[in-house]
Image (tube, rainbow, N blue to C red):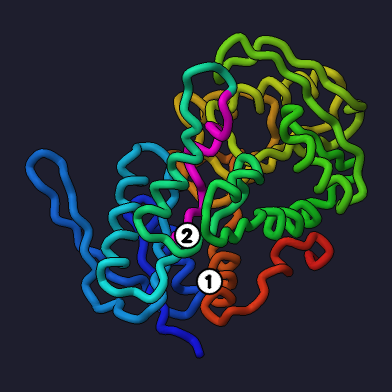
């Protein structure tokens, strides 16, 4: 038996949540906010959710209030006697802090997972985590979706004659290799060295880029330093063109300016995070119907394995 479904959104991801609700065939639930003089706020649902399945959609990109708002909404739904509360987190922020890479630092991704579970979430739906093992940080089921379901058909539609997949760093080689295997292309890997965070000091290209139409694959573009460095280097080494396919467009600081000035021909991103500014170089693909399909399957207790299998992509 299907439980009644209620779909809500935090303020940061309302633009995407409205599309998800429309694809699902319902309206986005109304959430009112009381704001106090010191900036403190309180969300409240304007309908009963007792006995229903509540899906709360919110990406946890900066500022940290987005995460706090998600936690408060989960707590409100739990205290309103919802049967299940499912946190839909298209972009799981703080995922890059998934290990101790130096002494005396937090594993913030695990901390955030603990907070979401402590708030009352019974299930997590997210997309393209920075590292797959973050799923193990949660003590509830995690539906980890891959944007490749959307990206692969788009890449095929480009009909690039000498398509070659590339990873902007060694850590993303597995992701790039999956695309290369399915699309039957070669794979190029960039080996980078950093003196400090977000600043690339040196990069080496491993593989042949001469005459190739390069497609850089990654999960996050933040300052765009690595991306533009790699694109410019590949073009200098004889690539025919360089494009990039990135799931989460964080694009902080002067990232857009770097992209505009770089030799990247096209940046393809999803709408898990809203763009602060538009650019002729940026193409946004919509992931709302993918999330809607998974919400429907979760509610009906149906399999969603087809969303993880490259071979099902047309």
The chief SS type of the magenta part is: loop
Asked whether residue 260 is in view, the answer is: no
Residue 46, given in percent of the width and then of the height, sits at 21, 72
Residue 73 in the image, given as x and y percentages of width and height: 30, 59
At 87% from the left and 36% from the top, the residue drawn is: 187
Q: What's the distance in space between the residues labelled 2 and 1, CA to CA?
A: 9 Å
Quadrant of res 296: bottom right
Q: Which residue is mark 2?
A: 88
Q: Is 302 situated above or below 142?
A: below
Between residue 230 and residue 130, name the one nearer to us.
130
Query: In this picture, which residue range is highlighted in magenta?
Result: 87-100
Q: Mark 2 or mark 1: which comes first in sequence?
A: 2
Q: Kindly identify the residue that appears in the image at 39 percent across and 37 percent down.
A: 62
Q: Secondary structure at mark 1?
A: helix
Closer to us: 258 or 270: 270
Disc number at residue 295? 1
- Residue 215's spot in the image, x, y percent? 77, 39
Residue positioned most to the bottom: 1
**Residue at the extreme left of the image, as rendered:** 37
Look at 47% across and 18% down and name the residue there.
104
Q: Are marks 2 and 1 in contact (CB under 8 Å)?
A: yes
| Count of numbered circles in the view | 2
Image quadrant for the C terminus?
bottom right
Describe the element under mark 2 as helix, strand or loop: strand
Q: Is residue 43 visible?
A: yes
């Amino acid at each position: 038996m299907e439980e009644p479904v209620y779909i809500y959104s935090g303020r940061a991801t309302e633009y995407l949540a409205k599309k998800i609700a429309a694809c699902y065939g319902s309206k986005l639930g109304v959430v009112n906010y009381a704001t106090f003089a010191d900036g403190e706020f309180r969300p409240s649902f304007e309908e009963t959710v007792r006995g229903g399945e509540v899906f709360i959609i919110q990406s946890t990109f900066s500022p940290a209030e987005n995460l706090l708002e998600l936690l408060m909404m989960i707590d409100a739904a739990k205290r309103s006697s919802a049967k299940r509360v499912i946190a839909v987190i298209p972009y799981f922020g703080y995922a890059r802090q998934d290990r101790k890479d130096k002494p005396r630092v937090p594993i913030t991704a695990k901390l955030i997972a603990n907070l979401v579970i402590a708030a009352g979430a019974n299930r997590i739906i997210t997309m393209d985590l920075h590292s797959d093992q973050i799923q193990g940080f949660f003590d509830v089921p995690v539906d980890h979706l891959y944007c490749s379901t959307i990206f692969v058909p788009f890449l095929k539609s480009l009909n690039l004659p000498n398509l070659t997949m590339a990873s902007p760093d060694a850590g993303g080689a597995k992701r790039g290799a999956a695309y290369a295997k399915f699309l039957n292309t070669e794979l190029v890997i960039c080996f980078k060295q950093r003196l400090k965070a977000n600043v690339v000091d040196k990069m080496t290209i491993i593989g042949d880029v001469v005459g190739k139409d390069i497609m850089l694959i990654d999960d996050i573009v933040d300052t765009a330093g690595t991306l533009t460095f790699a694109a410019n280097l590949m073009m200098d080494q004889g690539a025919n063109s360089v494009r990039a396919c990135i799931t989460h467009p964080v694009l902080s600081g002067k990232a857009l300016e770097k992209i505009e000035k770089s030799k990247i021909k096209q940046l393809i991103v999803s709408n898990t995070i809203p763009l602060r500014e538009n650019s002729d170089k940026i193409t946004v693909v919509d992931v709302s119907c993918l999330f809607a399909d998974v919400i429907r399957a979760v509610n009906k207790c149906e399999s969603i394995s087809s969303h993880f299998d490259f071979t099902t992509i047309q």
